[in-house]
Image (tube, rainbow, N blue to C red):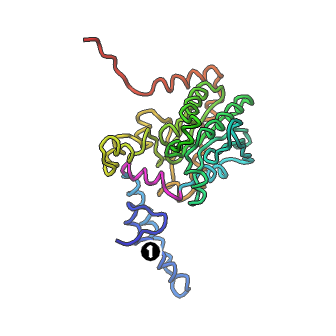
Amino acid sequence: MSELPKGMLDFERPLVDLYRKVDELKKLTKGGKIDLSAEIKALEHRIEHQKKEIFSGLTPLQVVSIARHVLRPTMLDLVKHIFTDFLELHGDRTYADDPAMVGGIAKLDGRSVVIVGQQKGNNTKENIYRRWGMANPEGYRKALRLMKMAEQFNKPVITFIDIPGAYPGIEGEERSVAEAIAKNLREMSCLEVPIIIVITGEGGSGGALGIGVGDKVLMLEYSIYSVISPEGCASILFRDASKASFAAEELKITSKDLLELKVIDEIIKEPVGGAHTSAELTAKNIKASILMNLDELKALSKEELLDRRYKKFRSLGIFEELKPI
C-alpha cells in the first residue's frame, strides 16, 4: 500500500492518484512546450467532485481523525484571522501561567472582547510545551480570572475549545483540577455578559466543559464534542480499543448529531476537506457566526441573558419519572 502524502488521511486515498496526475501535468506545462491547462482544470474539477462525495459520507470515527488532524488550525491560528489588537494576558494570580490555556483582550470589528481557549502546538516541540492543549488547574483559573475581568468591564466572552481532556498528570490532582473546572461551571453559568463557545477541534470531557458554559455553543463541522474519546469508551465499556468505531457512533459526538440533540446551537461550515485546508476561510466562517450571535445576545438584558442560559442547560437531556411499584 503506497504511503499517503503529508496531511492526507486514510479515507482520502482515492484522491492520491488524481493529485499526482495534476502535479505531473503541471510539471509538463511548466516546461512551456505544451499547454495542458484544460486537462489540469478537468482533473481539479474531478478532485473537488470526488472530495465532496467522500466528505458527505464520513463515519464518526473519520470525523474524529479530521478533528485531530496535525495541521488543523489552532486557537492562535484562528485568532489572528478573526480578531485584531490581541493582547495576551498571563497567569492565574494563584500559582502560575499555563501555556495550554491562552487568553486576553482583542477587537472584533472594533468591538472589545475577551477571548479564552485551549492552545495546541503546530509541531512536536510546541505540543510538548503546551501539553497538547490539556490545561492544568491554573489554566482554568486563568480563564476564570479573564472572564471575571470581562464581566467587570462589560465585555463579551468568546471561548475556543480544542482539548482531548484536562491534563491527567499528578500535578493536576495535587492542585485540584476538578475543583477548578467545577468552579468555572458555576461562575460561567451566572456571568453577566454574553458568552459564545466555539468548538474548533476536540471537545473532550471536563477539560472542554471548564470553558464550555455559554449562551451560544457553536461547533465547526468536523469537530467533536464528547464526555470521553471513542478509544477510551471502547477500552472501558468493551475492554477492547479496536471497537472505537462502534463507540464513536454510539457516543453521538459529531456536530450533526449534537445539533439534533440540541447540545449545540449551530454548525459552522468548514472548507471541503476540513479546516486544515484553509485556516483563513475557516476563520472567516467562524467570525461571521460570532458576529451574528453577538448581535442577537447584545439585545438582551442581564436578567434575560441569565434566564435564557439557565433554561438552555436545564433543558438538556430527556428523563422520565417512574411511578413507585
Instruction: Name the element at disc 1.
Output: helix
The verdict on residue 70 being magenta is: yes
Front in this rendered view, residue 204 or 38 = 204
The residue carrying mark 1 is 20
Image location (x, y in percent) of residue 101: 62, 44
Q: Identify which residue is drawn at 60% across, 57% down.
A: 126
**Residues shaded magenta:** 59-71
The verdict on residue 206 being magenta is: no
The type of residue carrying mark 1 is: Arg
Q: Quadrant of residue 155?
A: top right
Q: Outermost residue, left direction?
A: 325
Dominant SS of magenta comes to: helix
From the viewer's perspective, is 57 left or right of 35?
Answer: left
Q: Is residue 33 above or below residue 203?
A: below
Q: Identify which residue is drawn at 73% across, 28% down.
A: 152
Q: Quadrant of the N terminus?
A: bottom left
From the viewer's perspective, is 250 left or right of 132?
Answer: left
From the viewer's perspective, is 101 left or right of 275?
Answer: right
Give neighbour class at mark 1: few <14, some 14-19, many 20+ (Cα, 10 Å).
Answer: few
Image location (x, y in percent) of residue 217: 53, 36
Front in this rendered view, residue 180 or 44 = 180
Q: Identify which residue is drawn at 43% across, 54% down.
A: 65
Q: Identify which residue is drawn at 46% across, 41% down.
A: 225
Image location (x, y in percent) of residue 239: 31, 45
Image location (x, y in percent) of residue 98: 64, 45
Q: Outermost residue, bottom direction?
A: 33
Q: In this view, does 43 lie above or below 137?
A: below
Q: In which quarter of the image is residue 159?
A: top right
Disc count in the image?
1
Q: In which quarter of the image is the C terminus?
A: top left
From the viewer's perspective, is 147 left or right of 37?
Answer: right
